[in-house]
Amino acid sequence: MRGSGFLSLHGVDKRFPLKEGELHVLDDISLDIRQGEFVSIVGGSGCGKSTLLRLLVGLEEASGGSLRLDGASIRGTDPARGIVFQDHRLYPWLTVEDNVLLALANSPLDKAERLARVHAHLELVGLKHFARAWPAQLSGGMSQRVAIARGLVNRPKVLLLDEPFGALDALTRAQLQDELARIWQTEGITTVLVTHDVDEAVLLGDRVVVMEPRPGRIRRIVPVDLPHPRHREHPRLAELRS
Ligand code: ADP
Ligand code: MG
């Protein structure tokens, strides 16, 4: 049913004005995402994935159509929508703790509650001992972990990720994919992941939205109905635990 999702896009259109004419980037994007669902959006470079995510974040306004989260129109940025970009965008002059704390700038929590919230989220991403570290002391993977903690610290209704592991080496990427799956399971958070990596899209998504370019359209939506890797127990796990 159209328009019935927790996160719901209906007939979304995006055009950028050019010196002459306009660039039609997104055409008639409709998508309903259930609460707690993990949706991957996959497609080649330039097919409008980041633009679509920026519309969901509220950094960009649609030229047509509607975007709604939990019944309300998406307008402007909002702590109810957590975001992680490919580059971690940490402030180098702030500690890890202060970088995450900054995301709570408009929170109604008092100082002690904010700090407790920050530390709980650093623990969630495995960095509880790095609160006082500086971004320059962190590896690429650790920096992205901080970015994920920052994206979640407001307890958003949806987590939006734009190629979050695109700049990492293969091993670190695999570790972070694992961790994101674990976080998604513990937090039960509605998640939209944009990636050009089909394997990653299928590994993590409940559904995979495949986009095509010029203008960006949904080519198809593929449910991942295989037993999900993250739900599957490695045969040796039981043995290792006993
Ligand atoms: P993807 O993330 O799938 O690689 P993007 O959403 O970044 O694709 O870009 C889609 C198209 O929109 C590209 O042709 C890009 O140049 C264009 N584009 C993105 N942002 C702007 C903008 N602010 N102004 C003009 N064109 C833009
Ligand atoms: Mg992009």
Image (cartoon, grey):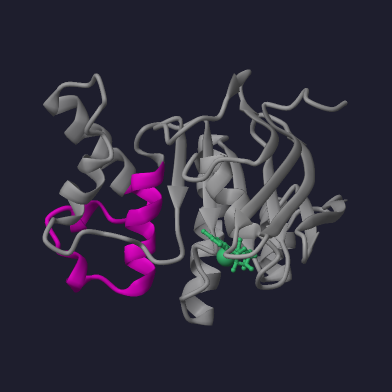
Residue at figure coordinates x 18%, y 49% from the top left: 97
Residue 24 shown left or right of residue 50 in the figure: right
Residue 231 shown left or right of residue 102 in the figure: right
> Percent x, y for residue 3?
78, 25
Say if the magenta span includes residue 45: no
The quarter in which the N terminus is drawn is: top right
Residue at figure coordinates x 29%, y 48% from the top left: 122
Which residue ends up furthest to the front in the rendered image?
20
Q: To which quarter of the image does residue 208 belong?
A: bottom right
> Percent x, y for residue 234?
68, 63
Say if the magenta span includes residue 149: yes
**Part of the protein shown in magenta:** 123-151
- Between 175 and 164, the residue placed more toward the observer is 164
Residue at figure coordinates x 77%, y 39% from the top left: 31
Please determine whether, in this image, residue 7 is positioned above or below residue 61.
above
The quarter in which the C terminus is drawn is: bottom right
Q: To which quarter of the image does residue 78 belong?
A: top left
Determine if residue 86 is in view.
yes
Determine if residue 240 is in view.
no
Magenta stretch mostly in which secondary structure? helix
> Percent x, y for residue 110?
16, 21
Quadrant of picture, ligand 1: bottom right
